[in-house]
Amino acid sequence: MSDKVSLFLGCLIPNRYPGIEKATQLCFEKLDIDCADLVGASCCPAPGVFRSFDEPAWLAITSRNIVLSEEMERDVLTLCNGCYGSLAEANNKLKESSKLKEMTNEHLSKIGKEYKGSIDVRHITEFLFREIGVETIKLNVTNPLGLKVAVHYGCHLLKPSRGREFESIERPTFFDAIVEATGCESVDYPDKMECCGAGGGVRSGLSESALSITNHKLSRIKEADVDCIINACPFCHLQFDDGQREIKEKGGNDYGIPVLHFTQLLALAFGHSPEDVGLQFNATDCSSLQKKLPSED
């Protein structure tokens, strides 16, 4: 593992949630993280769909992204569970199978690239937990937030468990730990490890089923009486954020729970404003949350 990383933004963040990108950069500056842009990166591509239909093409596209970071001699850092799942799984497969590596490099040779297997793929939450550490994050917090939050891990961050090396897949704590380093309380709630409803093409192909899963999880979170939902994936973010609007428009519950990516929460704890981290672009109204934020002296 390396403390030098390249930032893989994926598709959703630059296209729909630039506030997450801005918040992430603000956090890197505060924590003095050596992170470079991964210039020329493409879609990861999405693990739940693309890999299922054409694994060789998935490996070729995914490995090209990894090679870009290999050429920089930096680990890949992702802000998205799906991107992490796709890139990490492909990296593991290619490191473990000389046959797959040879086949993939045949494709890459056509564009003058070669996969070597020299770097790792990191997720922002595990990177901050392992490489930066909870105590360092606490020391850099200038505006302890004092919020009650519902942490959502998401599926692709933790599973498949092979190669993940987390302390627990069913009852993890590392994400809660870095959330609480901001001065927040991570409130436990039933079905905490349940899917947001969006992944695997369900949001696109079976939208009613996706919203049903989202509605159930939101009902559990609402019962926990929290100030906001904290996620580590822009696709989960989209499902909880836009999903609340969609549920309301279909005559369902009006949950009104603000939704933040973890880097937005962290940047707020580092003293940046809601506008700095893009909360004004959320589908859910964040005004109730903003009223509870402490003002920095």
Image (tube, grey):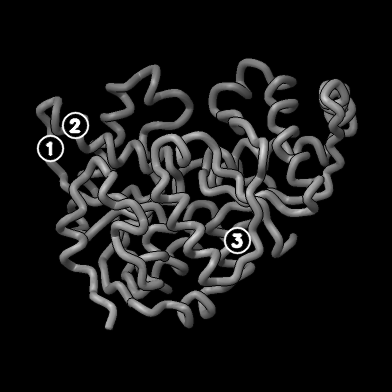
Eye-nearest disc, 3 or 1:
3
Closer-to-camera residue (65/190) = 65
Callout 2, which amino acid? Ile
**Most distant residue in the left direction:** 251
Label 1 Cα crowd, 10 Å radius (few <14 / some 14-19 / many 20+)? some
Q: CA distance from mark 3 to mark 1?
A: 36 Å
Residue displayed at 46% across by 69% down = 177
**Residue occupied by mark 2:** 247
Q: Earlier in the sequence, mark 2 or mark 1?
A: 2
Callout 1, which amino acid? Asn
Residue displayed at 62% across by 36% down = 86
Judge from the rendering whether residue 26 lies leftward or rightward of residue 89; answer left or right.
Answer: left
Q: Earlier in the sequence, mark 2 or mark 3?
A: 3
Label 3 Cα crowd, 10 Å radius (few <14 / some 14-19 / many 20+)? some
From what the image shows, is residue 28 above or below residue 40?
below
**Residue occupied by mark 3:** 127
Cβ–Cβ under 8 Å for marks 2 and 3: no
Callout 3, which amino acid? Phe
Q: Quadrant of the C terminus?
A: bottom left
Q: Earlier in the sequence, mark 3 or mark 1?
A: 3
* Residue 173 visible in this rendered orientation of the protein: no
Mark 2 element type: helix
Residue 295: x and y, percent?
Answer: 24, 75
**Residue occupied by mark 1:** 253
Cβ–Cβ under 8 Å for marks 2 and 1: yes
Q: CA distance from mark 2 to mark 1?
A: 7 Å
Residue 146: x and y, percent?
Answer: 27, 74
* Residue 52 visible in this rendered orientation of the protein: yes
Mark 3 element type: helix
Residue displayed at 71% across by 61% down = 4
Mark 1 element type: loop
Q: Quadrant of the N terminus?
A: bottom right
